[in-house]
Image: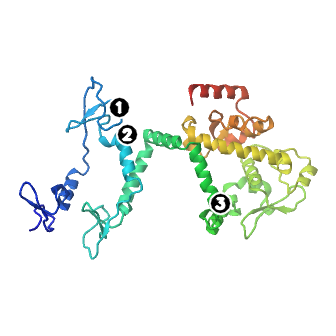
Amino acid sequence: MICEYGCEKEAKFILKNGKYCCENKYQKCENVRKISSNRNKGKTNLAKFFVNNNGTKCSFGCGKDAKFIFKNGKYCCEQVVNSCISVKKRMSKSMSGKIIKGIPIQNSTILCEYGCDQIAKYKFKYGRYCCSEVWENCPERKKINSNNIKNLWKTSTYRNKTTKAIKDSRDDLFSKKISKQKLKEWNNPNSKLNSHDRNKKLSKSQTMGLEKLKIKYPIFIKLRGEENIKEDSDSKQIIIKCDFCNDWFIPEREYLYEATFRSTTSLPYFLMFCSEECFKKSGTKTKIKWKFNEEYKLLEKYRTIVVKKTEKNIRKYGLEIQNLHLRGKGFELDHKFSVIEGFKLNIDPDIISHIKNLEILTIQENKKKLGKSSISLEDLLKEINKFNTIGG
């Protein structure tokens, strides 16, 4: 006997209604599943709102007061059952680590049912055919899922909710775990972090190059003169002629960055020296003297601590900073009470890296500060105390 529910398989069971079926329940039949899936595609089982005067709790175990009732008489805190926190947790646990894979089929003429119109190579338990072993890898599904996520991130509600959830999950334990993982990777000479290709790529990304310099900072080239700037043929690093002894030297990356930025402002011509000796002989007073003494090394250690603590606070309280999403798009993160002043006054790095000492400024505004503070230490401490009192 053949299954009477349309799958054309051999019948193995007789149901109570007298019909023959390939499964002990007709709902399990492949054809019935397929028909049901197509019929319910795009539909959502929405509950009806009701006034809960008796304090009825959600039937799905979250402990919240019910606001909706389904056709089957069950109560829920949400209009869609899958939105209930308790149901979400159960589904997450049941699917954790599981990947639904299709069964390979050969000589198929059936097209993928996920919209890419390629020949199906796999069949899933519920009867659908796909071009990939995992349905999420179908090219068409990838596009749809990508567009859905992009559209969701455009909505401020979803973006803020997701960002907050991610930041809340990244506690001290999480940070330590990630640090240990990264440390293992760095110590492993065969890891991706130490691969030749990655190092080469990073080296290229951090090298300015003469062509790029001409396009990005034409005023810098004009002020110094093209004859005083050249490029190393192998490393593509910029070589500058010293403004005192006229010897050629490769400036540090930060030194070159400072010089190129100064060329875009109304500040005086930025002198560049190849050594501390030339710097001293020139009699010039600039903050570049930090580069040539022990105090600069101590500043860099202090700055490193502040940066690490700052990034940690951003992950946790980033929503407190206005326009944080603009960071890296012509805007920079700025410490209102500057790191340099914090170092000079020996202020605790926890205060300098506090979320209330952070703001987003344009690159031009930030550089014009030149290490100065836009807030007094007294006012900063007041804001920090207020933040801690509220329970930030």
**How many numbered tags mark residues here?**
3
Rendered residue at 29%/63% (across/down): 124
Rendered residue at 73%/44% (across/down): 303
Of the pair 313 and 257, the residue shown nearer to us: 313
Residue 241: x %, y % from top left: 83, 60
As measured in the structure, the alpha-carbon distance from the residue carrying label 2 to the one carrying label 3 is 39 Å
Residue 64 numbered mark, or none:
1
Residue 141 relative to residue 380: left or right: left
* Structure colour scheme: rainbow
Q: Disc 3 on helix, strand or loop?
A: helix
Name the residue type under label 1.
Lys
Residue 43 relative to residue 326: left or right: left
Residue 238: image quadrant is: bottom right
Q: Are circles 3 and 1 on residues that touch, CB within 8 Å?
A: no
Q: Which residue is mark 2?
A: 85
Name the residue type under label 3.
Trp
As measured in the structure, the alpha-carbon distance from the residue carrying label 3 to the one carrying label 1 is 47 Å
Q: Quadrant of the C terminus?
A: top right
Rendered residue at 71%/44% (across/down): 305
Residue 194 relative to residue 152: left or right: right
Q: Which residue is mark 3?
A: 186
Answer whether residue 216 is visible to the viewer in this image: yes
Residue 331: x %, y % from top left: 61, 44
Residue 2 higher or lower than 91, as above or below = below
Q: Earlier in the sequence, mark 2 or mark 3?
A: 2
Q: Are circles 1 and 2 on residues that touch, CB within 8 Å?
A: yes
Q: Earlier in the sequence, mark 3 or mark 1?
A: 1
